[in-house]
Image: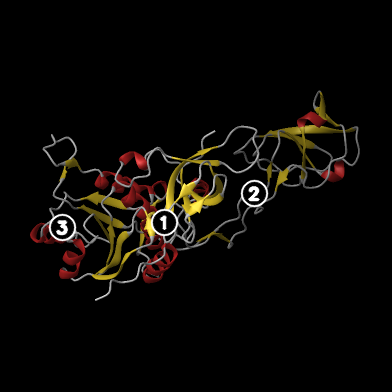
Amino acid sequence: MYPPPVLTPEKAKRRILLALAGRTLPSERTPLEKALGRALSASLVAQDDLPPFAASTMDGYAVRSADATSGGIRLPVRFQVFAGGRPPSLRAGECCRITTGAPLPRGADAVEKQEEVRRDGRYAVFRRAVSAGQFVRARGSDLAAGEVALEAGTLLDPAATGLAAALGHRHVLVHRRPRVVILPTGDELVRPGRRLRPGQIRESNGVALVAAVREAGGEARALPAARDEEGSLSRALRSAEGADVLLTVGGVSVGERDLVRAALRRAGARLSFWRVAIRPGKPFTFGFWGRTVVFGLPGNPASALVTFELFVRPALRALSGLGGDGRVWTWVRLKESQDKPAELSVYLRVRLLVPPAVPGLPLAEPLRTQRSGDLTSLSGADALAVLPAGRGRYRKGAAVRAVLLRPARS
């Protein structure tokens, strides 16, 4: 039997997202202060005008524009209005002192800022003509009652949560966060904090992936590492039943102890593919186990996190009702030439150097090591610079796309 084809990263991602279409997680009602980073599952409509009244945008004097048609006009100052006040009506031929945010008195249609007004006892002398609507924030100028303020699917960032609060909402309907179970595998793994015996290493992928899931907007828990044997893997999989997403780590390649794919199939999982033409992270599995979405990540730390970034992060966002990967993509220039297998897309872990006052694209400096088994091959990276398949060498200074993992350095 011939092995299944190796997918390009673009095709693998398309297949994953196509398979997840229509699987957005159900809605739940959540307090607004806990909704940051969630996607609205129902649009928010303005029940009232926003702002609900005409207000001054300056400290100054409210006036009828018809009473201040030229410089030198003197008008009596009848009263003062502060934010939160309920002023009386303003009659023709008079003005009032007003502060920023205060409601415009009935009868007034303009505000002149205090720098353009001279006080003369109980009178205000206007230095110039005043036009209707000047320094006034009109009622409903932000949103009119009945207008859609936030569409379903909107990411609730700080500004959106503030808008929802201004509309009077204490709770909102959002898509539930994906519940993710992480299952590290390997006979060599021991928990952090334990003394190492010969041939052992401390399990780190579970901790790193819990953090990655939470950063992507999911809820995560890591199971104890399963051993490379059928019984241990079967018991571990039973502990993961009911999760929205299962991430296994390790055991999905072609070695004698790579037993995870077989264990998943025995448990009833349907696997779509298991190889992607990338470095790091070629052995990668995707499929379904009942309603649970399954990803089999490679065991090497950089491979696990890079494949999470490329495939799992956008999948978690799709389940959460959000689009894309939530990352910023940009163009960079390679600081050094790079040789690579022509048949693979390579995701180079880089620091971005942005020299002050130097025009042009940021320089992408590869980290000290690019070996997928080295923990330092991704820690401290600002971005993944993409060297697409089809070429075996990229010259120094070549412009390539990069996905930002954090802000660039200066």
State the residue position of label 1: 341
Q: Position of residue 360 (x, y in %)?
A: 63, 42
| Outermost bottom residue | 1
Question: Callout 2: 10 Å neighbours few (<14), some, many (20+)?
Answer: some
Q: Amino acid at mark 1?
A: Pro
Q: CA distance from mark 2 to mark 1?
A: 65 Å
Give residue 79's position: percent from left, percent from top.
Answer: 72, 33
- Quarter placement of the C terminus: top right
Task: Indicate the quadrant where residue 349 lies.
Answer: top left
Residue where numbered disc 3 is placed: 257
Give the amino acid type for the residue marked by disc 3 in the picture.
Arg
- Rate crowding at label 1 as few (under 14), some (14 to 19) or many (20 or more) other CA atoms within 10 Å: some
Q: Position of residue 306 (x, y in %)?
A: 37, 51
- Callout 2: helix, strand or loop? loop
Find residue 53 and name its label.
Answer: 2
Q: In the image, residue 68 lies at what x, y percent? A: 86, 40
* Lateral position of residue 289 relative to residue 129, left or right: left
